[in-house]
Image: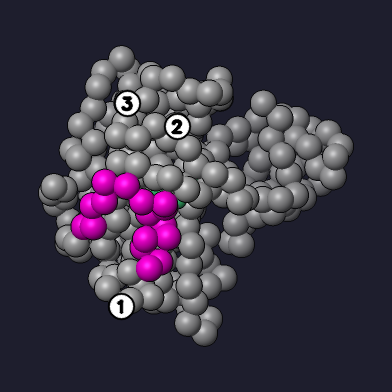
Amino acid sequence: ALSPQTLFTGRQVVSLPECASTNSEAQDLIHRNRATDGCVVITDKQTAGRGQRGNRWEAAPGENLTLSVVWRPSFLPAPDQFLLSQAVALAVHDWLVTLLGPDPALRVKWPNDIFFGNRKLGGILIENTLSGTMIQHSVVGIGININQQEFGTATAASLASLTGRAYSLELLASRLLEHLERRYLQLRAGRLAAIRHDYRQVLYRYRQPHAYEVDGRQITGEIIDVDEAGRLAVLTSGQVRYFDLKEIRYII
Ligand code: BTN
């Protein structure tokens, strides 16, 4: 069982041996009015894990963290929803710093992938439902590679592959929930400048000239910010351009 030292996040936990997707299970709880603020769905095995851009999320069963948190951020206007994404990515980063130590290789790749060097350690999929112009429910899905050693791709990593240790998923999940609640409370308290600042501090390739692909063409630019709508601000040829997720590709 999970035992996070939190006020509300993870006080209610639905732990499933297997499910299609913890985000979908969380959505289901919401529809059945069974989702308390901060409730968590966690599983050992996802059979249809979902990622961003309609991708699948694959993770070896029993070896990785796969969970979703439901919050009710009724204080958050829909146009500001990227702040929640930033807060969550920061919480995951905060937590990983406690496990790996501060390391400049540990970065948040916009919008909210967790990278170590050029390898992906984990991802976040947030699904919000609105009530008018405010957010009613937010399903925060987090997948982090922990004990898995073999990957089908050279661009993935796990905590164990970085440290050579093996981890208890339950202990890790409890600590992660504490970090998530801390950043969530920071957001709820309106400390938005701190969230934006801390996010920039850990942003992958921040202020480093690099190649990107835009409209099928290669550009060179430097990430200088992420705006309030969550768009990437890139300085290229003396001009700042703003991109949505579908509009720019990173070239590794
Ligand atoms: C991404 O990198 O594209 C986001 C991956 C998010 C995966 C997590 S695993 C728990 C939760 N349930 C899902 O189906 N997806 C998220």
Q: Nearer the viewer, mark 2 or mark 1?
A: 1
Q: Amino acid at mark 2?
A: Leu
Q: Residue at x 30, y 41 (%)?
A: 44
According to the picture, the residue beneath numbered tag 2 turns out to be 121
Name the quadrant of the C terminus.
Answer: top right
Q: Which mark is residue 13?
A: none
Place of residue 187 in the rendered image (x, y in percent of width and height, measured from the top left)? 37, 62
Rounded to the nearest angstrom, the CA distance separating label 1 from label 3 is 34 Å
| Residue nearest the viewer, comparing 83 with 249 | 249
Q: Name the residue at the top extreme.
A: 164
What range of the chain is rendered magenta?
Answer: 13-28
Magenta highlight on residue 216: no
From this view, report whether residue 73 is shown above or below residue 52.
below
Rounded to the nearest angstrom, the CA distance separating label 2 from label 1 is 33 Å
Place of residue 242 in the rendered image (x, y in percent of width and height, measured from the top left)? 73, 53
Q: Which mark is residue 33?
A: 1
Q: Name the residue at the bottom extreme.
A: 132
- Is the residue marked 2 within 8 Å of ligand 1, measured from its CB? no
| Residue nearest the viewer, comparing 250 with 17 | 17
Going from N to C along the chain, the mark reached first, 1 or 3, is 1
| Residue nearest the viewer, comparing 239 with 244 | 244
Q: Is any part of residue 83 visible from this angle?
A: no
